[in-house]
Amino acid sequence: MPRYELDGQVAIVTGAGRGIGRATALRLAREGASVIVADINEANAKGVVEEIESTTGIAHPVTVDVTIKSDTERMVSETVAAFGKLDILVNNAGIAIIASLMDTDEAAWDTLMNVNARGVLFCSQAAARQMIAQGNGGRIINNASGAGKVAPGKRTPLGAYAASKHAVVALTKQFGLELSPHEILVNCVCPGIVDTPMWDLIDREIAQLEGAPVGSVKARAVAGIPVGRIQQPEDVANLIAYLASSDASYTTAQALNVSGGMLPY
Ligand SMILES: NC(=O)c1ccc[n+]([C@@H]2O[C@H](COP(=O)([O-])OP(=O)(O)OC[C@H]3O[C@@H](n4cnc5c(N)ncnc54)[C@H](O)[C@@H]3O)[C@@H](O)[C@H]2O)c1
């Protein structure tokens, strides 16, 4: 059931072709927003648009590589061409690369920082320019991670990923302050262990490094979640929908946990 009354709002969700982005696009559409389903994977983006349209929601696909600044600008201009304006940007696109910090090479570092941090910078710039020109404020919601606040740990070789997600938290706080005069509220969500293709990859690759069975790394991670179950993409979409709504109109420059109790602060 719709709860947050986003009728008439226009939202972009990056990385919306699957996982948390897909769940977020479906949720915002269910709340009444017109949604740009943006992803580097064109077929997946089109598939999610079809899903939304099959439930009478409104959506439009845009193929984008968030690491390319001109692509992020085109994403915003295609949004305005399709729906006339932009109110909400969800910077969700992200990748994980499994390597200890001692084994992180130039390519891995640059790829992670480009997608996870640089992508947030340039998508936010392009969206905020449009929102400022419209003069009605807006929302930018970033998908950071628990790894944006705490180190993943010695058995979880995601150090460069964590560095890129700490960068997302910093971008959130500073963009929130810089854009506050324009009533553009900027926040990020910090999920825990979410059951998506990204965590399947993490499980497979760490299990291979450990010589352990597939599934064992995920099971170990889930055992550490206080609420006792793996997180679903919809758990994250719930918080994003709240942050997009008028109920969250006094919250900006914050990093909010949605981790089943895993994150201490
Ligand atoms: N899965 C988790 O446990 C978890 C936990 C915390 C945070 N996150 C974050 O949530 C976000 C979504 O994660 P997910 O688990 O749904 O991942 P996923 O791998 O299932 O989906 C990521 C999506 O981003 C798209 N994408 C990748 N690179 C892109 C690029 N350069 N330009 C545009 N789109 C691109 C992919 O095509 C894919 O559709 C990521 O930022 C991730 O870091 C995930």
Image (spheres, rainbow, N blue to C red):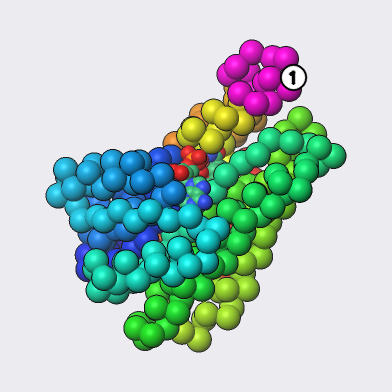
**Residue 70 x, y percent position in the rendering:** 48, 67
Task: Write the residue at 32% across / 66% down.
Answer: 78
Determine which residue is flagged by label 1.
210
* Residue 84, quarter of picture: bottom left
**Residue 154 x, y percent position in the rendering:** 80, 34
Task: Name the kind of residue labelled 1 in the image.
Answer: Glu
* Residue 138, quarter of picture: bottom left
**Residue 223 x, y percent position in the rendering:** 62, 25
Asked if residue 229 lies in the magenta stretch, the reply is: no
Say if 222 sits above or below 245 in the image: above
Prevailing SS of the magenta stretch: helix
**Is residue 125 something that shows in the picture?**
yes
Give 221 or 48, whichever is nearer the viewer. Answer: 48
Task: Write the residue at 68% across / 35% down.
Answer: 98
* Residue 102, quarter of picture: top right
Q: Secondary structure at mark 1?
A: helix
Count the marks: 1
Residue extent of the magenta highlight: 204-217
Task: Mark 1 and ligand 1: say if the CB distance to the nearest ligand atom is below 8 Å.
Answer: no
Give 185 or 134, whichever is nearer the viewer. Answer: 134
Task: Write the residue at 16% across / 43% down.
Answer: 54
**Residue 128 x, y percent position in the rendering:** 46, 76
Asked if residue 208 lies in the magenta stretch, the reply is: yes
Say if 213 sits above or below 166 in the image: above
Task: Write the residue at 61% across / 26% down.
Answer: 203
Left or right: residue 3 compared with residue 130 = left
